[in-house]
Image (cartoon, helix red, strand yellow):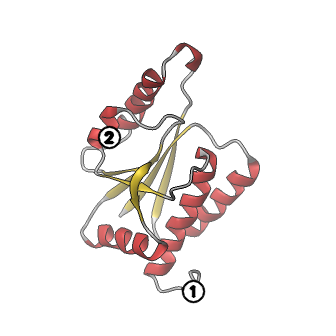
């Protein structure tokens, strides 16, 4: 299985970039992870929230293939602890999912079309994190899941 991360907008802070790069480098030993940054929409002051979500949605959907399993990181999604998330990922690997696409959306969430296309939604927490922080937290959680699957000592129970 391959994992694709779709991110709206670039990561601004160097400490977040370094953290994300650290976990992406570690993940290379376990699974292929491709990161695709969708540029921020220009002139958002002239757009409503719905128009902005629609434009971002078009960009997201253009990067998702027909057979991809699309998972949105969404505040209303299912919550997992780290062990259950690892089992969820492992199940996808075993059942032959070729590509799982995780999307960190823009500040207003996702368009109706993206919600219609998604296969599932997951939430990292009931708390709200900046989209910049979510990237680091989620990348670490994918790494943690891989170490749990492999029975390695990174995760302490």
* Residue position for label 2: 115
Secondary structure of the residue carrying tag 1 is: loop
Residue, x 46% and y 82% (percent of image)? Answer: 150
**Viewer-nearest of discs 2 and 1:** 2
Residue 18: x, y in percent? 71, 56
Compared to residue 41, the image places residue 75 above or below, namely below
Closer to the camera, 34 or 121?
A: 121
Real-space Cα separation, disc 2 to disc 1, in angstroms:
36 Å
Within-10-Å neighbours for mark 2: few <14, some 14–19, many 20+: some
Left or right of 13? Residue 7 is left
Secondary structure of the residue carrying tag 2 is: helix
* Residue position for label 1: 153
Left or right of 94? Residue 132 is right
Residue, x 61% and y 64% (percent of image)? Answer: 23
Left or right of 115? Residue 19 is right
Residue 49: x, y in percent? 48, 24
Quadrant of the rendered image containing residue 65: top left
Quadrant of the rendered image containing residue 66: top left
Compared to residue 44, the image places residue 100 above or below, namely below
């Amino acid at each position: 299985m391959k994992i694709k991360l779709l991110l709206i907008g670039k990561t601004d802070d160097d400490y977040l970039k370094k953290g994300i790069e650290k976990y992406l480098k570690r993940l290379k030993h376990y699974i292929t992870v491709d990161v695709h940054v969708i540029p921020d929409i220009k002139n958002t002051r002239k757009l409503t929230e719905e128009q902005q979500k629609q434009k971002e949605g078009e960009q997201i959907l253009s990067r998702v293939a027909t057979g991809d399993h699309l998972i949105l990181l969404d505040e209303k999604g299912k919550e997992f602890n780290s062990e259950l998330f690892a089992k969820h990922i492992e199940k996808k690997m075993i059942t032959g999912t070729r590509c799982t696409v995780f999307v960190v959306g823009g500040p207003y969430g996702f368009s109706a079309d993206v919600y219609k296309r998604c296969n599932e939604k997951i939430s990292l927490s009931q708390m709200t994190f900046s989209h910049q922080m979510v990237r680091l937290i989620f990348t670490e959680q994918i790494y943690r899941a891989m170490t749990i699957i492999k029975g390695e000592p990174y995760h302490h129970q």
